[in-house]
Image (cartoon, helix red, strand yellow):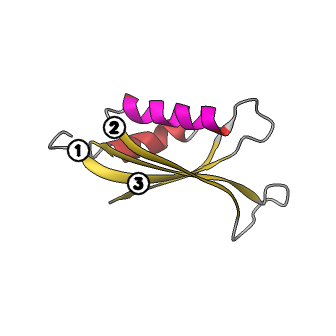
């Protein structure tokens, strides 16, 4: 690990409704996005499908949650969120420093 890298844990809510991509393919794409930003993925945990605490869309009451642990430079979380902003397979992104 580089001295300038920090450790992060990202939680992604995936939305693969009406898409041919499986959850595993979406996760692989997320891992590629992280490595593109000079990050190193250290762990992946597929939590599975969970119901939302607050439902904003009656047709979308739950989704698959995935935790990805990675180390990356300090600017990587903002860049990752910006990369995934237009990705329709990722419903929500939350990145925290650990």
Residue at 76%, 33% (x, y): give it. 19
* Residue 29 percent across, percent down from the top left: 54, 31
Q: Are marks 2 and 3 in contact (CB under 8 Å)?
A: no
Q: Which quadrant is home to the C terminus?
A: bottom left
Among the two numbered marks 2 and 3 on one chain, the one whose residue lies closer to the N terminus: 3
**Which quadrant of the figure has residue 86?**
top right
Whether 18 is drawn above or below 95: the answer is: above
- How far is disc 3 from disc 1 in space, using C-alphas? 13 Å
Would residue 9 be counted in the magenta stretch?
Answer: no
- How far is disc 2 from disc 1 in space, using C-alphas? 9 Å
Whether 33 is drawn above or below 45: the answer is: above
Q: Which mark is residue 9?
A: 3
- How far is disc 2 from disc 3 in space, using C-alphas? 12 Å
Question: Quick one: SS at disc 1?
Answer: loop
What secondary structure is the magenta-colored segment mainly? helix
Q: Are marks 3 and 1 in contact (CB under 8 Å)?
A: no
Question: Quick one: SS at disc 3?
Answer: strand
Nearer to us in this view, 47 or 21: 47
* Residue 9 percent across, percent down from the top left: 41, 54
Q: How many marks?
A: 3
What residue does disc 2 label? 40
Residue at 54%, 32% (x, y): give it. 28
**Residue lying at the far right of the rendered structure:** 59
Residue 6 shows in the view: yes
Q: Which quadrant is home to the N terminus?
A: top left
Range shown magenta: 24-35
């Amino acid at each position: 690990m580089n001295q300038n890298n920090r450790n992060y844990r990202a939680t992604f809510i995936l939305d693969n409704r009406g898409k041919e991509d499986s959850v595993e393919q979406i996760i692989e794409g997320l891992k590629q996005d992280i490595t593109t930003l000079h990050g190193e993925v250290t762990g992946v945990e597929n939590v599975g499908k969970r119901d939302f605490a607050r439902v904003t869309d009656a047709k979308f009451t739950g989704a698959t949650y995935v935790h990805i642990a990675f180390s990356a430079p300090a600017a990587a979380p903002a860049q990752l969120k910006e990369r995934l902003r237009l990705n329709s397979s990722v419903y929500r992104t939350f990145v925290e420093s650990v």
